[in-house]
Amino acid sequence: MDILIVDGYNIIGAWPELKALKEKDLAAARDKLIEKMAEYQAYSGYRVIVVFDAYFVEGTAKKYKNHKVEVIFTSKNETADERIEKMAIRLNNRKTQIHVATSDLTEQWAIFGQGALRISARELLNEMNTIEKGIERKVKKIQEKRPVSKIPISEEIAEIFEKWRRGKK
């Protein structure tokens, strides 16, 4: 099993679309990241966990699922980096490969030591763009294959039915 742990605010700060959104509405930027990670999870089959520092959110540590993506807010005195390192140790085993998405160089070296692989914010963005294009192609293919009518009928009959539908004789 592959698990992708995402350093939430690090990715938000690195992706142009999310960075611009963060300036207006931080919660909307978080939600957008979670939506994108849900697409990533559905397409890749990875289990995705997004970790946010409690620094920007008042209250105690929280953990919940949104779009089947695990979302964790650290406790007040814990950084996302610390939580990610602990999770990389706890989740790593012979059957699991941990991937950590962050552009924080210190964090990257720390997770290498735990046996995890790193994905930079730019690499993850490129991968997301590829995934979104793949999804668009699949949707387009499905739409092209879908018949206009469930019952094949001639143009003449279709026109008659359309007149009936509109109440014309």
Image (spheres, rainbow, N blue to C red):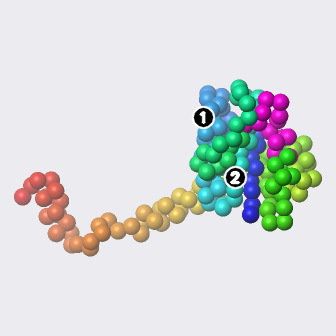
Q: Is residue 97 above or below residue 49?
A: below
The residue shown at (68%, 35%) is: 19
Q: Position of residue 13 (x, y in %)?
A: 73, 37
Name the secondary structure under disc 2: strand
- First in sequence, mark 2 or 1: give its number: 1
Name the secondary structure under disc 1: helix
| Location of residue 134 by image quarter | bottom right
The residue that mark 2 highlights is 48
The part of the chain drawn in magenta is 73-85
| Location of residue 62 by image quarter | top right
The residue shown at (53%, 58%) is: 136
Q: Position of residue 6 (x, y in %)?
A: 74, 47
Q: Amino acid at mark 1?
A: Ala
Residue mark closest to the camera, 2 vs 1: 2
The residue shown at (56%, 59%) is: 135
Q: Is residue 125 above or below residue 145?
A: above
**Which quadrant: the C terminus?**
bottom left
Q: Is residue 160 left or right of residue 30?
A: left
Residue sitting farthest toward the left: 169
- Is residue 169 shown in magenta? no
| Location of residue 17 by image quarter | top right
Q: Position of residue 164 (x, y in %)?
A: 13, 59
Which disc number belongs to residue 28?
1
